[in-house]
Image (cartoon, rainbow, N blue to C red):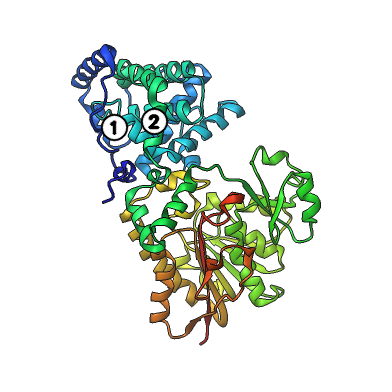
Amino acid sequence: MDKHPSSQDSPKASPPRSGQGSRAGTREKRGAQDRRQANSRKPSYNKAAKAGAERPRRDNGWNLGPGAQSRLIIARAIQTIWGQGVSIEDALEKQNGFHELSTRDRAFVRNVTAVTFRRWGQITYILKQYLKKQPPTFIMAILRSAAAQSLFLKMPDHAVVGESVDAMKAVDSARGFVGMANAVLRRITETGASHIGAVPPHNNVPGWLLKQWEKDYGRMEARRIARQVVEIPPLDISVKKDINTSELAQDIEAEPVYAQTLRRPHAGNITKLKGFSEGDWWVQDLASSLPVHLLHEHLGSFDGQHIFDLCAAPGGKTLQLADLGAKVTAVDKSEFRLHRLKKNLERCQLNANIITADVLNLPNDLGQADHILLDAPCTATGTFRRHPEVLYNRKPKDQAALIKLQKRLLKAASMALKPGGTLTYCTCSLQKAEGEDQITAFLKERSDFRLNRILTKSLLDIDSDIILDGILRTRPSFRSDLGGMDGFFTAILEKTG
């Protein structure tokens, strides 16, 4: 196991034990005494904390001011992400009071939560310098998010300390830790910045993942990839084919990147941008748009082609296929996620047949497709620029289970494809075990399929190794000077018999 400070932070597990650090003063000692007394009175709390769920007997948190209330929601969201392996957005949806916050406070909550995960390894190291003993997960979540605010978002120290402590006071089982937290946070605001340089950015990636990237891409490239986690990504949008991208780019202060993709340096409120309400475009990372572009280039036209988009939600590729003239059947087992796809289809005035079903058990009357695009469930580590929590809400056993699922999905998709058709397999994982290795294993077992090599060499006019051995592999380090892109894998297979 890698011994970087972040390498001990395996997702869905208890956070790493803290090392010995500097003393936090007499207030910290008093806080420790209070903590022991609180734990003796409430032995069930530590059990709940280890399970990643803060369950106080009484919660008067919703009488807090917006600043403290926001910080309480952030801490609980971090607990949920860590303990349940969900996304930031899904975790926030579960938090009482989140939707009652103002638009500005909701944006604050999202930003702090994301930065906490972007800087997880560095924050872990810094906290170790001030903690003598690892506190429960809720307290650690408060401390982590407060450190992110003070050290990396440069928020006023008095607000960070005061409102974080107020958030703790609102939770009965956290009150015994208030003295310790107050002392630790004050010391972090005073001297914490001096420790940032001791931890390089690549230590914000868990050790087990960094080791896989080093194995797949080499040590130097793995670190180039990892450095992108601390960078705030730009906003990419896919524009409908009949919209003038040059004019739209000027209107929304964006730059053309490739084909129908425009890039804005910052997201902002996308619903206020020109063309959103008219349905002229949708949000989609550049790398995510490439599989459809490659398939369209390979076939020449989608006209008259019935294409299944399997595991379709949230639906960016469905919108692309429909816009380029395909007859699309989009399948996903999540009705909730398909609802978002339906809304985007309506907004963009595009058509697709939406089916809520498990790809492993496709409806018998669905028939076979001329072509299939399978965007398989994966660890999604290639999306860490926009979703830094994916680095910490997954662990090795999750990847192993997903690899088995991907094999089954490839088999199911192959059965739903007409002879002579193409099966485009893609994932947004950086690990080759979920991409190249899957295709190699599939082709060894299936003599009725062959790799239809992607021959485009001028794609994006970037790194020459974006296409190797007939497959596409993008990495976050590609075009980092322009904001990078997601890590994505794409292979096009042809059914010969």
Q: Earlier in the sequence, mark 1 or mark 2?
A: 1
Residue, disc 2: 144
Asked whether the viewer can see residue 307, the reply is yes
Tell me the residue at 67%/37% (across/down): 269
Q: Which mark is residue 49?
A: 1
Q: Residue furthest bottom?
A: 497
Q: How many marks?
A: 2
Q: Nearer the viewer, mark 1 or mark 2?
A: 2
| Residue 210 higher or lower than 34, as above or below | below
> Above or below — where is 213 with respect to 22?
below
Could you say which is closer to the camera, residue 264 or residue 493? 264
Residue type at mark 1? Ala
- As drawn, 52 above or below 283: above
Residue at point 62%, 73% (across, down): 456
| Label 1 secondary element | helix
- How packed is label 2: few (under 14 Cα within 10 Å), some, or many (20 or more)? many
The picture places residue 200, in percent across and down from the top left corner, at: 40, 42
Q: Position of residue 458 (x, y in %)?
A: 64, 69
Q: Is residue 59 visible?
A: no
Residue 191 in the image, given as x and y percentages of width and height: 38, 23
Tell me the CA gap for discs 1 and 2.
16 Å
Q: Is residue 344 above or below residue 63?
A: below
Please state the horizontal and vertical placement of residue 19, each as a whole percent of the image.
24, 33
Q: Quadrant of residue 85?
A: top left
Work out which residue is located at the far left of the displayed protein and give it. Answer: 40
Q: Residue at x 72, y 47 (%)?
A: 254
Identify the amino acid type marked 2: Arg
Is disc 2 placed on a helix, strand or loop? helix
